Image (cartoon, rainbow, N blue to C red):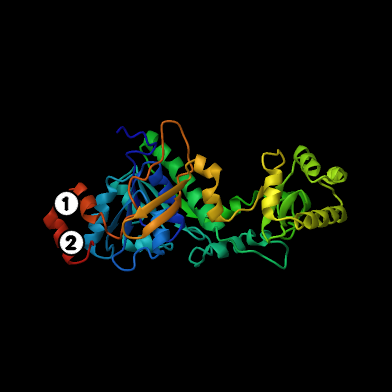
C-alpha cells in the first residue's frame, strides 16, 4: 500500500514524558512520522496505562540509559539519522547529559531540536517547577475561568499543557522542519508552556486593551457577562450551551422560546438589563429537562446545544460520522477508547498503524535498523545501557 502520509519518512526521537511532549509527538506520529519514544531504564514515562495507550499510539518504544557512556553513544548514533528531537527536561539537564542542541547539531546539521519546559530556557523562572495549573495561574488565564471571582474553576482538559505546550511546540517544530528541508539547517525551538498559554489569551488581552483592565471570571463577553452566551442549568441538573452572539441567532432563539420581547435585549450595555435577562433564561431552562431543550433547538439555526458528557459525545452521530472515535483492544492494556487524529486532508486517511509501545518494546528492532548487531545489542543489554 502506498504511504501518502504528509510526514512519511520523518524520524522523531522523543525523550519526553507525561503530557505536553508525548501528545506533540502523537500528532506527528498520526500524520505519518516514525516516532521513537525513548524512555530511561528506571521509572520511564510513568503516566497511567490507559493514558499511555491513548497518547503513544503509532510510536515505537525503546529504553536507553543516557547516563552510561555506551547508552549515550547509542542515542548519538540514532541522532545522525533523525529529523527531530523533542525533550522535556528541566533547563540544563540536556547539557549535563551531553545531548544539548549544540552537541547534536554538530552530528546532524539538519536536526530540529525542541525543548519543552514550563517557563523556557531563559528568564528568572527558568528553573522553577510547575504543572498546568501553575502555568494557567501565572499567566492570568486561570483568573478568567469560572462562574465568578469567588468560584475559579479547574479544567480536566489541561489548557496550558496542551494548548501552550503541545500545540505551540508542534507549530514551532513543523515550521523549523519545513525550513530545514529547503535550507539544510535545523533550528533550536525553545518552547515555554507558560509563553504558549499567555500568547493565546487573546480575549482578555482585548478587554485589557479596551478598558485598561480585565473583567473578573464570569464577567466578560465569553465567560458569562452576556445572557446570550452562557451555560444554563436544566431541571435534571444538566446544562444547555447558548451561543447566540450574533443578532440573527438571538432573534431565532427568542422566537423558539416564545419570548420576542427579549429580542431588543440582545447585548445590552446596561448590566442590570443583562442580569434581568439572565435571570429570565435561568428560570426558563430550569423548567424542563435537557432532553426537552435539546430536541427543541435541534436543527434550528440559533447556536444552542446540550452540554454533553464525554461518553455521550463519543456516541454522537456527528463524531461517528467523522470517524473521530477509535475503539481498540491494546494487547496489554485492554480496551481503549480514543479520539482519532482530528486532521483531515486530501490524499491522507488516519489509521492506527501500531498500538502504544510497552517500555522498550522495539529496542532491538530500532537498534538493528541503526546498524548494531544482535551481539552488540546483547552486550548493551547486559549492562542495562539499553533495555
SS class, disc 2: helix
Q: Residues within 10 Å of mark 2 (few under 14, many from 20)?
A: some
Kindly check if marks 2 and 1 are in contact, taking CB atoms under 8 A apart as contact: yes
- Where residue 376 appears, as percent x and y from the top left, is 14, 56
SS class, disc 1: loop
In the picture of the structure, the residue carrying the numbered disc 2 is 380
Q: Quadrant of residue 301?
A: top right
Choose between 248 and 300: the one closer to the eye. Answer: 300
Q: Residues within 10 Å of mark 1 (few under 14, many from 20)?
A: some
- Placement of the C terminus among the 4 image quadrants: bottom left
In the picture of the structure, the residue carrying the numbered disc 1 is 372
- Placement of the N terminus among the 4 image quadrants: top left
- Where residue 131 appears, as percent x and y from the top left, is 52, 64
Choose between 322 and 295: the one closer to the eye. Answer: 295
Choose between 333 and 177: the one closer to the eye. Answer: 333
**Residue drawn at 32 percent across, 51 percent down:** 104
Choose between 349 and 359: the one closer to the eye. Answer: 349
**Residue drawn at 85 percent across, 55 percent down:** 276
Amino acid at each position: 500500500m502506498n504511504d501518502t502520509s504528509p510526514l512519511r519518512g520523518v524520524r522523531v526521537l522523543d525523550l519526553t514524558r507525561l503530557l505536553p511532549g508525548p501528545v506533540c509527538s502523537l500528532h506527528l506520529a498520526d500524520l505519518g512520522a516514525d516516532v521513537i519514544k525513548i524512555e530511561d531504564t528506571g521509572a520511564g514515562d510513568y503516566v497511567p496505562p490507559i493514558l499511555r495507550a491513548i497518547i503513544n499510539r503509532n510510536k515505537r518504544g525503546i529504553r536507553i540509559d543516557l547516563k552510561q557512556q555506551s547508552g549515550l553513544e547509542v542515542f548519538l548514533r540514532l541522532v545522525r539519522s533523525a529529523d527531530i528531537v523533542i525533550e522535556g527536561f528541566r533547563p540544563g539537564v540536556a547539557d549535563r547529559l551531553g545531548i544539548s542542541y549544540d552537541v547534536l547539531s554538530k552530528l546532524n546539521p539538519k536536526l530540529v531540536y525542541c525543548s519543552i519546559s514550563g517557563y523556557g530556557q531563559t528568564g528568572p523562572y527558568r528553573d522553577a517547577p510547575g504543572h498546568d495549573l501553575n502555568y494557567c495561574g501565572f499567566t492570568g488565564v486561570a483568573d478568567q475561568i469560572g462562574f465568578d471571582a469567588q468560584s475559579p474553576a479547574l479544567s480536566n482538559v489541561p489548557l496550558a499543557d496542551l494548548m501552550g505546550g503541545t500545540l505551540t511546540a508542534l507549530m514551532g517544530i513543523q515550521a523549523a522542519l519545513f525550513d530545514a528541508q529547503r535550507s539544510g539547517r535545523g533550528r533550536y525551538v525553545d518552547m515555554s508552556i507558560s509563553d504558549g498559554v499567555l500568547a493565546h489569551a487573546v480575549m482578555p488581552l482585548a478587554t485589557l486593551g479596551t478598558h485598561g483592565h480585565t473583567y473578573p471570571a464570569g464577567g466578560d463577553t465569553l465567560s458569562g457577562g452576556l445572557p446570550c452566551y452562557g451555560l444554563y442549568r436544566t431541571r435534571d441538573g444538566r446544562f444547555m450551551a447558548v451561543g447566540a452572539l450574533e443578532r440573527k441567532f438571538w432573534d431565532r432563539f427568542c422566537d423558539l422560546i416564545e419570548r420576542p420581547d427579549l429580542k431588543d435585549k440582545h447585548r445590552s450595555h446596561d448590566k442590570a438589563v443583562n442580569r434581568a435577562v439572565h435571570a429570565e433564561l435561568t428560570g426558563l431552562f430550569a423548567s424542563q429537562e435537557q432532553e426537552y431543550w435539546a430536541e427543541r433547538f435541534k436543527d434550528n439555526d440559533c447556536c444552542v446545544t446540550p452540554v454533553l458528557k464525554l461518553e455521550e459525545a463519543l456516541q454522537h452521530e456527528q463524531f461517528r460520522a467523522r470517524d473521530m472515535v477509535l475503539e481498540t483492544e491494546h494487547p496489554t492494556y485492554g480496551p481503549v477508547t480514543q479520539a482519532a487524529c482530528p486532521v483531515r486532508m486530501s490524499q491522507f486517511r488516519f489509521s492506527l498503524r501500531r498500538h502504544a509501545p510497552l517500555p522498550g518494546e522495539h529496542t532491538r528492532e530500532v537498534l538493528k535498523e541503526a546498524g548494531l548487531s544482535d551481539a552488540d545489542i546483547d552486550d548493551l543489554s547486559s549492562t542495562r545501557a539499553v533495555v
